[in-house]
Image (cartoon, rainbow, N blue to C red):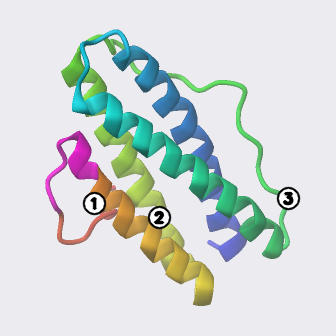
Amino acid sequence: MTELDALQRTLAAEHAAIFELGALGGRASTLTATPLRTALAAAYDVHVQRRDELRPMVAAAGGDPVAAEPAYRLPTPLTTLAQIEAEALRLERACATTYAALVAATSGPSRRWAVDALVATAVGEAAFGGPPEALPGLHG
């Protein structure tokens, strides 16, 4: 996989993450106030920031940044706190896997950025009940 391919794949994953985190936040808003709602909002903000950082990285690598899909399929049901939390954890783990692939495909400043994103995503999994892992992003 080329660096540009990996950057595009990561940008596409961020588009999907933003869509899904927004939907999960909407579902969680019907529940009583919980730390999950705060964690979802924080994760959403982080993923928006990363998406915004990835766009110029793709352009600098010679690509036209991939656009978001009009919509993404959500798993069902997502009505309980446990279901929403489990899906948020699955999403963060998928992003960690994508960032691990980006680390492998990049060098220099892009790799440093990808490593930072991978570490932050792995740490962020804890907000959704994820246990620490020795090699985050490799559970695939």
Q: What is the distance, in whole Å, between disc 1 and disc 2 at their CAs?
A: 13 Å
Q: What residue type is labelled 2?
A: Tyr
Image coordinates for residue 102, horizontal then vertical, percent: 53, 70
Q: Is residue 128 magenta?
A: yes
Q: Where is residue 7 in the image (x, y as percent from the top left)?
A: 65, 65
Tell whether label 3 touches label 1 (CB within 8 Å): no
| 35 displayed left or right of 113 | left
Q: Using a 10 Å C-alpha cutoff, classify the residue at mark 2 as few (fewer than 14 neighbours), some (14 to 19) or many (20 or more).
A: many
Q: Which amino acid, by three-letter code, is at mark 3?
A: Asp
Name the mark nearer the viewer: 1 or 2: 1
Residue underneath mark 2:
99
Q: Reading the chain from its start, which is encountered first: label 1 or label 3?
A: 3
Asked if residue 107 is positioned above or below residue 14 in the image, the reply reads: below
- The residue stretch that appears in magenta: 125-132
Q: Give amino acid for label 1.
A: Val
Q: Where is residue 14 in the image (x, y as percent from the top left)?
A: 57, 48
Do callouts 2 and 3 mark residues in contact (Cβ within 8 Å)?
A: no
> Could you tell which of marks 2 and 3 lies nearer the N-terminus?
3
- Identify the residue shown where x is 71% and y is 38%: 68
Question: Could you classify mark 3 by the number of other residues whose Cα lies within 10 Å: few (under 14), some (14-19), or many (20 or more)?
Answer: few
Q: Mark 3 points at which residue?
A: 64
The residue mark sitting in front, 1 or 3, is 1
The secondary structure type at the circle numbered 3 is loop
Residue carrying label 1: 123
Q: Which of 80 and 1 is in front in this view?
A: 80
Residue drawn at (77%, 43%) of the image: 67
